[in-house]
Amino acid sequence: MHPSFAEDDDVVVNPSVQPKLDELVAGRVLSRRGLLAGGMGWAAGVMLGGCTVPTRPAAIGQAPAGPLRLGFAPVAKHTLDQVSVPDGYRLAVLHALGDPLQPGYEAWRGDGTELPASYDQRVGDGHDGMHFFGLGHDGGWDSRRSDRGLLAVNHEYVPSPFVLHPGGITPGAQRVGTEAHKEMLAHGVSVTEVARSADGRTTMVKGSPYNRRVTALTPMELAGPAKGHRLMCTRHSPQGTHTRGTQNNCAHGHTPWGTYLTCEENWTNTVSRAAGDDVRRTAAEVAALNRYGLPEGRNSPYRWHTAGTDDLHARWSSSVTAGSADADYRHVANTFGWVVEIDPFQPASTPVKRTALGRFSHEGAWPAPVVAGQPVVFYMGDDARNEYIYKFVSAAAWDPVDARGGLAAGSKYLDHGTLYVARFDADGTGEWLALSHGLAGLDAGNATYGFADQGDVLIHARLAADARGATPMDRPEWGAVNPLNGEVYMTLTNNRNRVGAAEKPVGAQLHTDAANPRSYADTSARPDGTLRVNRGNVNGHIIRWREAGGQAAAIRFQWDVFLFGAQADAPADVNLSGLTDANDFSSPDGMCFDSRGLLWIQTDDAAYTDVSNCMLLAAVPGVVGDGRQAPAAGGTSTLAGAPVTPATLRRFLVGPKGCEITGVTLTPDHRNMFVNIQHPGEGMPADFKAHRFGSHWPASQQEPASLARPRSATVVVTREDGGEIGT
């Protein structure tokens, strides 16, 4: 997001500058002996898994039939206002901001004059996480079908320069009501039916009964331990059982029972708190609000609360304005930051916020492969600098009879279970720490915040994770689980607040540690001759782990760093993965495994965009433990995965100017890939009168001289010969 209008990713709200972590890792020597001391279970797992290249399935549901190999020429880096794909591939725009879902709505005008209310039936803005669900002949989920399906797409936010308004945002102390209303409706999720024709082209089915918008105004149910909690009560729902809206939906997830999970990340972009509000709060409330980035006097970037005094707008201020919580919105912030479950096959169903999965800046929620008789497990990241990685383990064991169970199955598996947070130790092992009321100081006697019950723990999951001594990470974003061996990958996008092992932390800065090992000054020359001025871990990395015994619900795990982002010409202690011009990248963000075991990696970068726009890469992953101990820039040793080569990692797609590449998903037959192009031209100069913007994509894809407004969009990538993508 562009920091001029959105939450600043550099702001750190975790006060734990890690004396606890320093104590934990003190004396743990990162060495071959230390690795062996981590446990024979891990060593045996590596030997059994082997260091061979993962294999690909011959067909869906069948055993792997041969080595997985990349089958395309690397795409060159560029800074053009185009999306480029390998030779032999083609792409088409599926839908973009403002496209109508139903007949009777006029097409996108391109001047921002569409009626605000029409956006409850138009594609939203800021396309982000998404998932393809095969649509069966009976109208239910068919996990094998590829030629017809439902595509659920997140709409994270409305990017600058706000092309959905005639001239951008109208300046002034108070927001214009019609503009605020349009922005509320442009957030959330789109569910659209898509169909593939005989020539292999996939299009949106306008008018499908499945086409649906879920927005910042949609009624929502609350479920799980925080339902009915005193800290969830608002004027809208005095009993704390319901709320309205979902927004800042970044990454996503899907369930083994065919529902979509949309995850609320930077929700503080929409919620404000008045100056002087602290004196109306208890000390515990103030500590909790500050820990979630909502200090008194903070106006959200959108300032929706200034557009009117009616309930539509008042609900966006979390200030105390009445004598009791059921008469104002002092607790409205607690109704955001959750995982929201949507049944795409039931367009009239009410989405449900699953509070058992905890409240934080949810990037996404990714399932481990389910096994009959074992718990269902989801992995999650809290996308902010120095925040944590979590997992949820259901109380109920998986029963395949629930495979098409919809929201009822969600109630069974997502409303009861245990939330854990990760601690990464320097010897390559780690532990999942339970966030359960009454355990290890998570009780009313906690000095920082007194937890009254389990609902309190989940509403304040960050505070609970602080108390348990979790490891602060370099912005945990997307996760993905290798379907061939169950190993889990998580992108750590970047962190400018890391300092090297020999330096003293200042303020909210943290020392490097083995799992977040790099701190370096990037002062290399840009193409125009000026110097970059970047500090910390500016290029990010991807961590991965294997659960003990191959059991997703295990408490212990083994980890290493699969991949380090870097410029190809960076020093060896920065470019630890051996990247070349065919595959160098910065700031990994979106990510997914396809069912063949191929890993797709997307970037959201600001450190290297003078050389290349953001991109999508394909990787053939190894296994945890296939690399070596290595010293990283900043003086900290780490466990680095095997160096990659252009044969195992290469660039597949490069986006247009100013964009983020995000939200990749494939059809089950791997012949259609959906990719989101978010915020082209964001943060670049805009002149509405002259029709000049930092990007003019997607119109510039076909007309390079176009002066059309830039729009976030979903594209469909196919091979010209109709074959499988990537191999």
Image: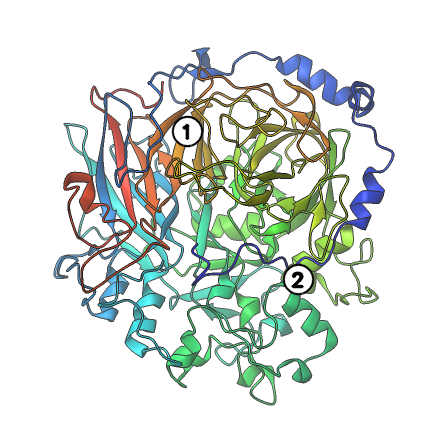
Which sits in the foreground, 375 or 509?
509
Q: Position of residue 666 (x, y in %)?
A: 35, 32
Relative to residue 559, is residue 247 drawn left or right?
left
- Mark 1, secondary structure of its residue: strand
Instruction: List the residue tagged with mark 2.
Output: 460
Residue 622 to residue 686: above or below: above
The residue located at (73%, 64%) in the rendering is 453
Q: Position of residue 604 (x, y in %)?
A: 44, 43
- Mark 2, secondary structure of its residue: loop
**Quarter of the rendering containing residue 625:** top right
Q: Categorize mark 1 by other alpha carbons within 10 Å: few (<14), some (14-19), many (20+).
A: many
The residue located at (29%, 37%) in the rendering is 136
Q: Position of residue 339 (x, y in %)?
A: 51, 54
Q: Nearer the viewer, mark 2 or mark 1?
A: 1
Which residue ends up furthest to the top in the rendered image? 66
Q: Is residue 135 visible?
A: yes
**Residues marked 2 and 1 touching at CB (< 8 Å):** no
Instruction: List the residue tagged with mark 1.
Output: 617
